[in-house]
Image (spheres, grey):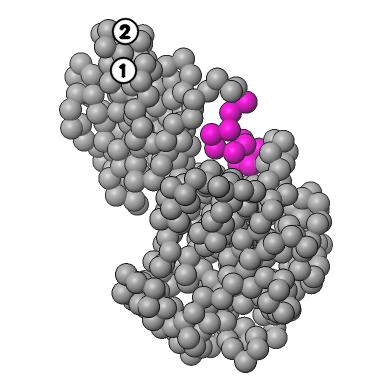
Amino acid sequence: MPEGQALVLGGGGVAGIAWMTGVLAGLADAGQDVTGADLLVGTSAGAAVAAQVGSGLPLDALFARQVDPALQAREISVELDMEKLGAEFAALLTGMSSAESAQDAQRRVGAYALAARTVPEAERRAAVSSRLPSPEWPSRRMLLVAVDAESGQTRVFDRESGVNLIDAVAASCAVPGIWPPVSIGGCRYVDGGIRSSDNADLAAGSARIVVLSPLGLNSPFPQPVPLRDAVERLRSDGSQVTVIAPDEASVAALGINPLDPATRVPAAQAGRAQGRAGLPGDGADPALAVVEGGEDVPGLVDGAGGGGAVGGDDAEVFAQVQDGHAVGPAERGRIEFLVDLEEPGGGWRAWGAPQHGQVDFGPGPRDGGVDDGDPAAGLADEVSCPQVAVGQDGGHGRDDFGEAVA
């Protein structure tokens, strides 16, 4: 039986550190402080945030360290082309169908990192050290993930590893090709995000798991343990898992270069605003039903034969259902489903605001009409039957955003 609570913090550069800090502060503002979790799991940027949370410094103070220039860490500015880096990693991370081949792929990325020209290791360590309020490991359990650059093996550091906390964080944050591999005990370590941007599977056994993922369920980088797969396994094992990814405002604040120190203030502020909305699915009204995307909601439409609303895409969409309305946040934006009993003939309307624009799937089943709210945003649409609207998000392939059955 799963027990306890875990907080999983994923990779995402200095922008991700700021965003996650903001989200945590915002959740606390909303009365949903999750930083008291029994287990902290940190990867890359998340390793820094885990160490910061574990230091015991209050959230308001941690937030101030992101938005107050006088308190900010001494970060090293670097140019990063995410598309190019993603393509390079995709070429290296091939053949990951088994544990052995995954290790081989991780070893190839490690070799790439060892051959890259970067800033000196000592300079990078100093920058990481400036992020941490304390160099001491917390008393509670904290797992920081890195990868041995030479063997390709995953290494999980904790307070029992005999490794300095600064070195463990630096190792987990050592983005291949950008930052130097970190020397620990005769080995060289690189970013744990090679294995998984979040490594949420390491929280197995926890009853309640909150994952803050700057890269979300659709990471631009291929990885042996995708977040989506990890979440599915955790849920099948009985854990309650909540994933928080950047909303539309946060995506804009994070920018195109997550390693740019200038992103810290806007990312932290956007994260705090997002956090103040509370945990997805946690409504103040206990009468609200929480359903997963793709799940039928019987009786949502009253009348002969009942009815239901279905909202879903490849990722799960969480919806709150009340009085014939279903509203739920999607990975990179907000998708809203509405069954409108006022429409002539018992019609329905579903509309969504995904990452790339607004699309209106209406007005009802009589003609199956569809109206794009923003055709210039790369959205296409199709009606497969009078009561189903299917939209295509230009960045993420075809998604079924809504279905209503009258």
Mark 2 to mark 1: distance in Å?
A: 8 Å
Q: Residue at x 48, y 65 (%)?
A: 196
Residue 362, position in %: x, y?
Answer: 30, 23
Magenta residues? 273-284
Left or right, 9 with reference to 50: left
Residue 307 shows which numbered tag?
1
Q: Is residue 73 visible?
A: no
Residue 389 shows which numbered tag?
none
Q: Residue at x 26, y 41 (%)?
A: 380
- In this rendering, the answer to whether 263 lies above or below 357 is below
Circle 1 sits in a helix, a strand or a loop, which is it?
loop
Main SS of residues in magenta:
loop
Q: Quadrant of the C terminus?
A: top left
Residue 303 shows which numbered tag?
2
Q: Assess whether residue 274 is covered by the magenta stretch.
A: yes
Pointer 2 and pointer 1: residues touching (CB < 8 Å)?
A: yes
Q: Residue at x 62, y 83 (%)?
A: 182
Residue type at tag 2: Gly
Label 2: few (<14), some or many (≥20) within 10 Å?
A: few
- In this rendering, the answer to whether 185 lies above or below 7 is below
